[in-house]
Amino acid sequence: MSTLLAAVSAASQQFASVVADPAPSGVPDVGGGEAPPGADGLLTVLKWVAWSVTALCVAGIFGVAARMAVDHSKGGGREHVKGLGFVLGACVLVGSASGVVGALV
């Protein structure tokens, strides 16, 4: 039991020395910087664009639903499903835009 404790103690000392003095990486972390002057206006415009695109996605779903209701008696369901697929694809892109950009940057 004492040899196990000695081994754990030696391993924790080695781990502490590695954590205390990490090797420098070659790539600096630029993601933690601060925004340049005037960035507040750009962020306001981006928020307006995001709100507008989200509203357009909701309007697109309403538009597909309206066309489905009007054309129900004609049997044109396949075209509506394709249109709904495109609108929902746009909704997924809008919803994941910041995550995609964050993963790439």
Image (cartoon, helix red, strand yellow):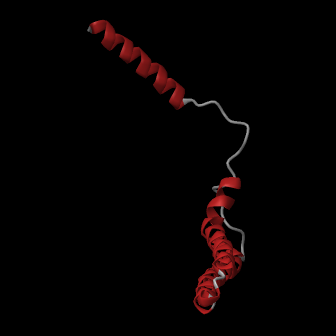
Q: Is 36 placed left or right of 5 in the picture?
A: right
Residue 91 position in % (x across, y down): 62, 73
Q: Residue 33: in sight, yes or no?
A: no
Q: Residue 35: in sight, yes or no?
A: yes
In this view of the protein, which residue sits in the foreground, 3 or 79?
79
In this view of the protein, which residue sits in the foreground, 96 or 98?
96
Q: Farthest residue toward the front?
A: 74
Numbered circles on residues, count: 0
Residue for point 63% across, 80% down = 57
Residue 54 position in % (x across, y down): 61, 80
Can you say which quadrant of the picture contains the N terminus? top left
Q: Quadrant of residue 66?
A: bottom right
Q: Farthest residue toward the left?
A: 1
Q: Is residue 33 above or below residue 56?
A: above
Q: Is residue 59 above or below residue 83?
A: below
Q: Quadrant of residue 105?
A: bottom right
Q: Is residue 59 above or below residue 35?
A: below
Q: Is 62 placed left or right of 17 in the picture?
A: right
Q: Farthest residue toward the top?
A: 3
Residue for point 63% across, 56% down = 32
Residue 64 position in % (x across, y down): 63, 84
Residue for point 73% across, 37% down = 26
Residue 89 position in % (x across, y down): 65, 69
